[in-house]
Amino acid sequence: MKVLPLDKLREALNIMANDAEVYVPMLRDDISGYFQWADNPADELALDLLNTYLSPKNVVIPQTEPMYKFKTSKQDVEITEVQVREGARIIFGIKACDLKALENLDMAFLTMGFEDEYYKARRQDLTIIAQACYKPGPACFCEGMGADRINPAADVLIHELENQDYAWEAKTSRGEELTAKIAALMEERDVTLPQAEPQSRKVDMTGVSEKLAEMFEHPVWDDLSSRCMNCGICTYVCPSCYCFDIQVSNRGEAGNRFRCWDSCMYREYTMMAGGHNPRDYKKERYRNRFLHKLQFFNERYGANLCTGCGRCVILCPNGVNIIEVIEKVKEVKLDA
Ligand code: SF4
Ligand code: SF4
C-alpha cells in the first residue's frame, strides 16, 4: 500500500497548494478548524482532533460571501458583480461525519431544481481526502446517523498508522490525479491498518422523523427548550447547518451586499417587515431547529440534517444534547 510518511506531509500539502486552495485541520489563534494551508510556521496541524471546533463547511459556504458592489448617484445605481469563486479546492483529513454533512449541503444547494451559484462554484472542483476514523470521541454518534466512519466515499482515503504515517488509497480518478502529483514523496509498504474502536454513543433513528410529524404542538418542547438560551453556537459549529442572511455594508453612496451565516436560534432570523415574527419565542426557535434537522429535511431529501459529529453536544454552554432530545422524543406517548 502507498504510504505518505508524516515528515513528508507538509511538503505534500505545499505541492497540492501550488494549484489549489487546500483546507487542512489546524489550530489557528487557539481555534481549531479547516483553514487554508499556506505553510505558515505558526499553524499547527490538528489531524488528531475529534472534532475540530469549526467544521469544514466554510470551504463551500464561507462565513461571509461577497455578492455585488453598488454605487448610487441621485436616481442611478451602478452595480458591479463580484465573480463567483470558482477554482480547484482540496479538503484534507475530513472525517465521515463532516463528509456526510457535505452531502446534506449538496442536497440543499444543488438539487430539487435549484442550484446556488455561489455554492456550486466552490463545490464543483473540490477534491476530498478523507481520513478513516478509528477512534471515535465520547460525543460522536455518526454511525447512528448512517455514516461509514472507516470507509467513507472520497477521492482519497487516508488511514493514520501506529507510527502516525498515512496509508494512502486513491479511490477515484480525481484522487489518482492528485496522488500522481505527490507520488515522489510516497513509499510502498506492507501495512497493518488500526483496529476500529467501537462508537459508544448509539442512536436509533427508526421512526423518529414520522413521530416528530405528530409532535408539533406537544408540551415536551416547553421542557426541552427550557435549558436553551438561543446563543446560536450549535448552529455555527454544525457542519450541516446552512442558513444565511443577506446584509449590506455601505459608506455614503457606495457599498456592497454580502451573505453571511445566520442562525435560526435568533429572534431576528424570522422577523418580518412590519414586526410580525412567526417564531417569536425561544421554544418555537428551539423546536424548529430539531424539526428541521430530524423531520423537515428528511421529508424533503430523505436524510437527517444531523450527522452525529457531536460538536453541539460538546459545545452547547447549557448542556443541550441532541441525543437526549432524540431519546426524549422516542419516550413521548402520543394520544391514540
Ligand atoms: S448552543 Fe445550546 S444554548 Fe446555544 S442555541 Fe444551541 S442549544 Fe441553545
Ligand atoms: S446537530 Fe450537532 S451533532 Fe448533529 S451534525 Fe450538527 S453539530 Fe453535529
Image (tube, rainbow, N blue to C red):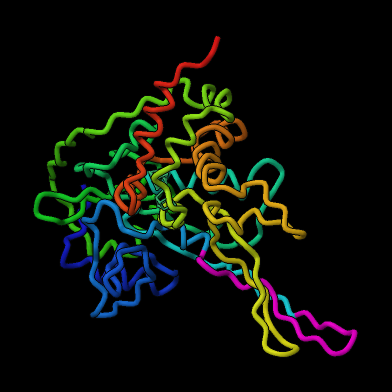
Name the chief secondary structure element in magenta: strand
Q: Please tell me whether residue 204 is drawn above or below residue 103 in the rendered image.
A: above
Q: Please tell me whether residue 16 is drawn above or below residue 158 in the rendered image.
A: below
Task: Tell me, yes or no, whether the highlighted magenta stretch contains residue 78.
Answer: yes
Q: Is residue 156 left or right of residue 195?
A: right
Q: Furthest-top residue in view?
A: 336
Q: Furthest-left residue in view?
A: 163
Q: Is residue 109 left or right of residue 222?
A: right
The structure residue drawn at horizontal position 36% and vertical position 49%, both measured from the top left corner, is 312
Task: Tell me, yes or no, whether the highlighted magenta stretch contains residue 74.
Answer: yes
The structure residue drawn at horizontal position 39% and vertical position 48%, both measured from the top left corner, is 98
The structure residue drawn at horizontal position 44% and vertical position 50%, both measured from the top left corner, is 173
Residue in the foreground of this view, choosing between 160 and 233: 233
Image position, residue 298 (x, y; %): 55, 32
Q: Please tell me whether residue 331 is drawn above or below residue 3 in the rendered image.
A: above
The structure residue drawn at horizontal position 34% and vertical position 77%, both measured from the top left corner, is 38
Residue in the foreground of this view, choosing between 219 and 101: 219
Image quadrant of ligand 2 equals top left
Q: Which residues are magenta?
A: 62-79
Residue in the foreground of this view, choosing between 177 and 101: 101
Q: Furthest-right residue in view?
A: 75
Image position, residue 151 (x, y; %): 32, 38
Numbered marks: total: 0
Image position, residue 192 (x, y; %): 12, 41
